Amino acid sequence: MLYYRSGVLSEIEFYRDVENVRFEEIQFFVDGGLECLRYLEARNGGAVVDVGAVLFENLGLTTSRLDEAIVEAHTVTAFEKGLWDDEATEFSIISFQ
C-alpha cells in the first residue's frame, strides 16, 4: 500500500503476501518475527510501541508486532523522515532483547 501526503509518497506498507521484503540482512515474513525485532531494535538504538505498532524511528520503519501469533496481521512500513515525530511521544519503550 502506498500512502501520500500533499501529493508526495510518504509511506509504503508491506503485508505478508509481498515476497522478499528485506532490510539489510533480514527478510521480513521469512525470518522469525522476534529475530527481526531484535535486529531492528539493535540497529535503531531502541524501540517504542503503541497499540501494537513498533516504531524504529531512526530507521524509518514501523512493524506490527512481528513476534505475535496472528501472522496475517504482520506488516512492515517504511516512512519518510519526520513523519512520526509528533506521534512518537505517545509510545512506550519496549525491548525484545
Image (cartoon, rainbow, N blue to C red):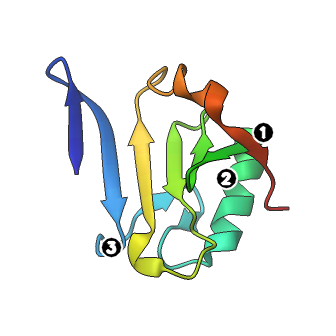
For the residue labelled by badge 1, is the local secondary structure a helix, a strand or a loop?
A: loop
Q: Residues within 10 Å of mark 3 (few under 14, many from 20)?
A: few
Query: What percent of the width, then of the height, locates residue 23?
Result: 52, 55
Name which residue type carries label 2. Answer: Leu
- Marking on residue 45: 1
Q: CA distance from mark 2 to mark 3?
A: 19 Å
- Label 2 Cα crowd, 10 Å radius (few <14 / some 14-19 / many 20+): many
Please report whichever mark, 2 or 3, sits nearer to the chain's N-terminal start. 3
Q: Residue at x 59, y 43 (%)?
A: 55
Q: Which residue is mark 2?
A: 40
The vertical placement of 85 against 63, above or below, is above
Q: Label 3: which residue?
A: 19
**Which badge, 1 or 2, is on the more N-terminal residue?**
2
Left or right of 71? Residue 97 is right
Residue type at mark 3: give it.
Glu
The residue drawn where x is 70% and y is 71% is: 35
Q: Secondary structure at mark 3?
A: loop
> Who comes first in sequence, dot 1 or dot 3?
3
Vertical placement of 8 versus 63: above or below?
above
Amino acid type, residue under disc 1 in the picture: Gly
Quarter residue 76 falls in: bottom left
Give the number of callouts.
3
Q: Is 88 positioned to the left or the right of 64 in the image? A: right
Residue at point 42%, 43% (across, down): 78
Quarter residue 75 falls in: bottom left
Can you tell which of label 1 and label 3 is closer to the viewer?
Answer: 1
